[in-house]
Image (cartoon, rainbow, N blue to C red):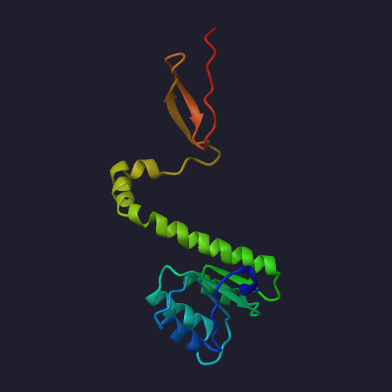
Amino acid sequence: MLAGADFECREAASGVDALALLESGEKFDLLLTDMLMPDLDGIALLERSREQYPDMPVVFVTAVHDIQVALQSLRNGAYDYLLKPFERQQLLATVCRALDHRRLKREDEPYEPIFPSRTTQIGPRSRQRPAAGASPMVAHPDPFRGKITPTAAHGGTRKRTPSW
């Protein structure tokens, strides 16, 4: 399915073979795995792969319809969990989202050292959540009136205050 969509793919017959393929030195962008495999199950493969390749997204494609197993895989760092049978477009969309997510994380890596220091400079008061039902507001000076007018923090437009 993925090879037909111009993805370069490698296959492994078991979890141990998949781990050996990952350790071969070849670079991989994504791990697509089943939950139930001989020798090494999907959760163990996820944990072992995350140790060596923490930024590589792992997507489970499995027939295991157990919510506890799905939650455990997501808590252990899986990017997504697709249940069989699935549509081709669903798989392609999940793989593309996972690869985009990885690309964006890599683009953000140079900025990571900056953000923790900025949030500590801002202080704890700015991280408080607004009261239920309250709309977060930011005050901006109105260049037309010289007054402070509220603007919705989510990108709303400035509201001009009538002067009459």
Percent coordinates x, y for residue 70 in the rendering: 57, 73
Frontmost residue, 129 versus 7? 7
Residue at 50% of width from left, 29% of height from top?
Answer: 151
Frontmost residue, 49 versus 135? 49
Percent coordinates x, y for residue 64 in the rendering: 64, 80
Frontmost residue, 119 versus 82? 82
Residue at 40% of width from left, 73% of height from top?
Answer: 53
Seen in the picture, residue 67 relative to 160 is either above or below; the reply is below
Seen in the picture, residue 22 relative to 78 is either above or below; the reply is below
Among the 4 quarters of the image, the one containing residue 84: bottom right
Residue that sits furthest to the bottom in the current view: 39
Residue at 54% of width from left, 80% of height from top?
Answer: 10
- Left or right for 53, reference 122: right
Frontmost residue, 59 versus 69? 59
Percent coordinates x, y for residue 5 in the rendering: 63, 68
Q: Quadrant of the C terminus?
A: top right
Among the 4 quarters of the image, the one containing residue 52: bottom left
Number of residue marks: 0
Percent coordinates x, y for residue 86 in the rendering: 70, 72
Residue at 52% of width from left, 64% of height from top?
Answer: 99
Seen in the picture, residue 27 relative to 105 is either above or below; the reply is below
Q: Quadrant of the N terminus?
A: bottom right
